[in-house]
Amino acid sequence: MIEKRYFKTKDYCKVKFSFESEGKKVELLGLNNDWKKPVVMAKDTNGVFTASVNLPKDSKHEFKYLVDKKAWFNDADTVEQTTNVFGTANSVVIL
């Protein structure tokens, strides 16, 4: 799930990513086209991993979740996905 919070006086949007997983570690990759610097997500008491990131307004970002350094997942709630160079899909967040 993705929650967006816009600010009238800021040029960015605070985006909260939530991902439910049985894994021990979940990372968020691809934002700002940076697939090498993961955002480590925090696990809450309900087993949901979350991370908040500031992203520029009026932008579009591809991303995926990486669970336990071995399995890639898309966000089922995104309205758009795009094919990547590996022939699979990336989730897209539009601000």
Image (spheres, rainbow, N blue to C red):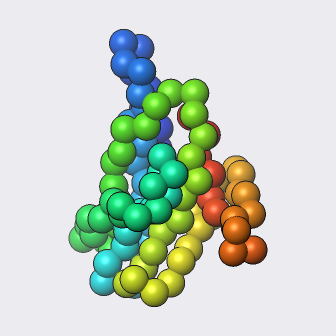
Snapshot quadrant of residue 15: top left
Of 33 and 48, nearer the camera is 33
Image quadrant where one finds the C terminus? top right
Left or right: 11 in relation to 78: left
Q: Residue furthest top?
A: 9
In this picture, is 93 found above or below 6? below
Q: Is residue 27 visible?
A: yes
Number of marks in picture = 0
Left or right: 60 in relation to 22: right
Which residue appears at 40% of the width and 64% of the height? 36
> Residue 34: where, in percent of width, then height?
45, 55
Q: Is residue 1 visible?
A: no
Snapshot quadrant of residue 75: bottom right
Which residue appears at 69% of the width and 65% of the height? 84
> Residue 48: where, in percent of width, then height?
36, 68
Which residue appears at 42% of the width and 21% of the height? 11
> Residue 50: where, in percent of width, then height?
34, 59
> Residue 33: where, in percent of width, then height?
51, 51
Of 4 and 91, nearer the camera is 91
